[in-house]
């Protein structure tokens, strides 16, 4: 089989790229190694930046998001027994975020693509990319038990952190930057109304907690836990008690409790692979960079990469110019490193390490107090949270 753009990975990055290319009249084939049901159920992100929302609308995938997504104009920061709201529009010139689960984004994109896009093959596992530095790169993959080859003009690795496309960049040219954190998140989904109408991020002596939601009747909550935590050690009652203890602040109320319908333990990691482009191979989304989820950036970074890449491929086929394609890695990495910094900052400011010194705790509380009391510090957080400029030609650089 031959296609113009071979896309490995049918997560948000791969599906959105295929959709944007389809709208630009560029053919693609998406290879996804899991089943459709699996990719549509995988619990992950919840917060969409405004640029992500606008991109999904422009892609024709905004209808259900606009109906069911919840617009959030701020977040609540809790620390030292106090609660402080950071309002976004007033600090960012009118910007906000939308809570709409990644599972739903993926369902919308899969349905659109199957209805009117090119081939999207589930249970198609890519093994390697050959000829990345030639003008006819090829993806070797297995589908329905048969080894096959997809030849392409370009190959894009949207295959997440454990993907294989990254290996097409020669090892001596690939640089990786990584940081792991000495704690994980226990994430739960519960049939219970959210405790608050906006997200609550809590610093406490017992560790970090986050109260998010999926709808007015479904809560999504997270607790900082030690690495290698066993789910068996966390029966429902213990989870709710711990969330209540960590989220407590003056005037706050206990969470609404309900059946917990899903739970998992997630490691925390920061990772960047550079460059994001070599020869005719490009990396987008988690295939190139991972952030700890505290800043809600991962999905939004994936969407921003894809926006830049779709624009560059469109220009390449419309005018023959590869100028934007050649600039892809540098354009994306500028924003990626800002998001890496913000995610690291949110993580290390809100979590407690085992054996953390009282000095380090005082530094965290001092920084949180600064955010709560200084419009400048609050604005810096708000601008990062609602999303920095993508880096498209003609976009205003000063947000
Ligand atoms: P994905 O979603 O991992 O998709 C990669 C796809 O590639 C497939 N694949 C292959 N297919 C074929 N052949 C191979 N060899 C393959 N290897 C892999 C995989 O099956 C998969 O379908 O990457 P993508 O598209 O780059 O999307 C990235 C986002 O999923 C991720 O960054 C976010 O979920 C991160 N994240 C959050 N991001 C936000 O922007 N806001 C949030 O609120 C937010 N919350 C979160 C999060 C991630 C979390 N976890 C689970 C780490 C909350 C959590 C708990
Ligand atoms: C979520 O709703 O899953 C969520 C929201 C904000 C985060 C992380 C996860 O920072």
Image (cartoon, helix red, strand yellow):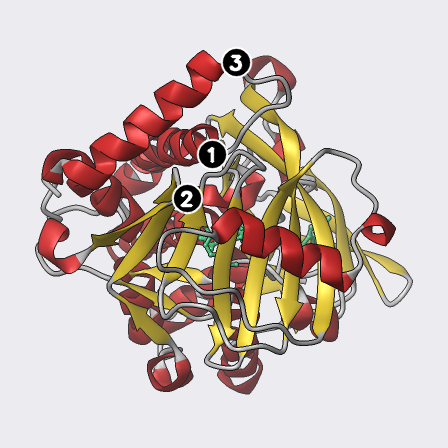
Q: Nearer the viewer, residue 290 or 156?
A: 290
- Give the image location of residue 118, x and y in percent: 55, 74
Image location of residue 106, percent across then percent down:
55, 70
Of all residues shown, which one is farthest toward the right? 145
Q: Which is closer to the viewer, label 3 or label 2? A: 3
In the picture of the structure, the residue carrying the numbered disc 1 is 347
**Is the distance from the Cβ of mark 2 to the nearest ligand 2 atom less than 8 Å?**
yes
Instruction: Look at mark 2 in the image and give the residue it sits on.
Output: 295
Kindly identify which residue carries mark 3. 357
Marks 2/1: CA distance? 8 Å
- Quick one: label 2 or label 1, which is nearer the N terminus? 2
Question: Which residue is found at the position 46% from the left and 68% from the top?
Answer: 195
Q: Residues within 10 Å of mark 2 (few under 14, many from 20)?
A: many
Find out whether the residues at labels 2 and 1 contact each other: C-beta distance under 8 Å.
yes
Horizontal side, residue 342 vs residue 194: left or right:
left
- Whether residue 89 is situated above or below residue 298 in the rendered picture: below
Task: Compare residues 139 and 210 and report the one nearer the observer.
Answer: 210
Residue 350 in the image: x percent, y percent?
A: 45, 35
User: How far separated are the C-alphas under marks 3 and 2?
Assistant: 24 Å
At 39% from the left edge and 43% from the top edge, which residue is drawn? 81
Q: Secondary structure at mark 3?
A: loop
Rendered view: 172 above or below 301? above
């Amino acid at each position: 089989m031959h296609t113009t753009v071979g896309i490995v990975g049918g997560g948000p990055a791969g599906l959105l790229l295929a959709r944007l290319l389809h709208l630009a009249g560029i053919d693609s084939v998406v290879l996804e190694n899991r089943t459709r049901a699996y990719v549509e159920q995988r619990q992950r992100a919840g917060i969409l930046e405004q640029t992500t929302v606008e991109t999904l609308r422009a892609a024709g995938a905004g209808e259900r998001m606009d109906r069911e997504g919840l617009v959030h104009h701020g977040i609540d920061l809790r620390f030292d027994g106090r609660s402080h709201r950071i309002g976004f529009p007033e600090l960012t010139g009118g910007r906000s975020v939308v809570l709409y689960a990644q599972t739903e984004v993926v369902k919308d994109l899969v349905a659109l693509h199957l209805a009117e896009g090119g081939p999207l093959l589930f249970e198609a596992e890519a093994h390697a990319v050959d000829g990345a530095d030639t003008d006819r790169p090829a993806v070797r993959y297995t589908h329905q038990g048969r080894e096959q080859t997809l030849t392409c003009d370009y190959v894009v690795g949207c295959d997440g952190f454990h993907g294989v496309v990254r290996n097409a960049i020669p090892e001596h040219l690939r640089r990786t930057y990584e940081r792991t954190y000495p704690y994980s998140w226990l994430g739960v989904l519960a049939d219970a109304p959210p405790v608050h109408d906006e997200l609550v991020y809590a610093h406490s002596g017992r560790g970090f907690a986050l109260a998010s939601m999926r709808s007015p009747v479904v809560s999504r909550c997270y607790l900082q836990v030690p690495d290698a935590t066993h789910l068996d050690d966390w029966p429902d009652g213990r989870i709710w008690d711990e969330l209540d203890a960590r989220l407590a602040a003056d005037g706050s109320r206990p969470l609404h409790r309900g059946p917990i319908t899903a739970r998992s333990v997630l490691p925390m990691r920061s990772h960047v692979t550079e460059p994001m482009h070599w020869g005719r191979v490009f990396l987008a989304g988690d295939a190139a960079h991972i952030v700890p989820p505290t800043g809600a950036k991962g999905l939004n970074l994936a969407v921003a990469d894809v926006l830049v890449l779709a624009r560059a491929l469109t220009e390449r086929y419309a005018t023959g110019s590869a100028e934007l394609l050649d600039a892809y890695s540098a354009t994306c990495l500028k924003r990626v490193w800002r998001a890496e910094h913000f995610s690291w900052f949110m993580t290390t400011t809100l979590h407690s390490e085992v054996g953390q010194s009282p000095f380090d705790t005082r530094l965290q509380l001092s920084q949180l107090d600064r955010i709560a009391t200084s419009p400048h510090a609050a604005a810096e957080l708000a601008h990062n949270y609602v999303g920095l400029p993508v880096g498209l030609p003609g976009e205003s650089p000063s947000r």
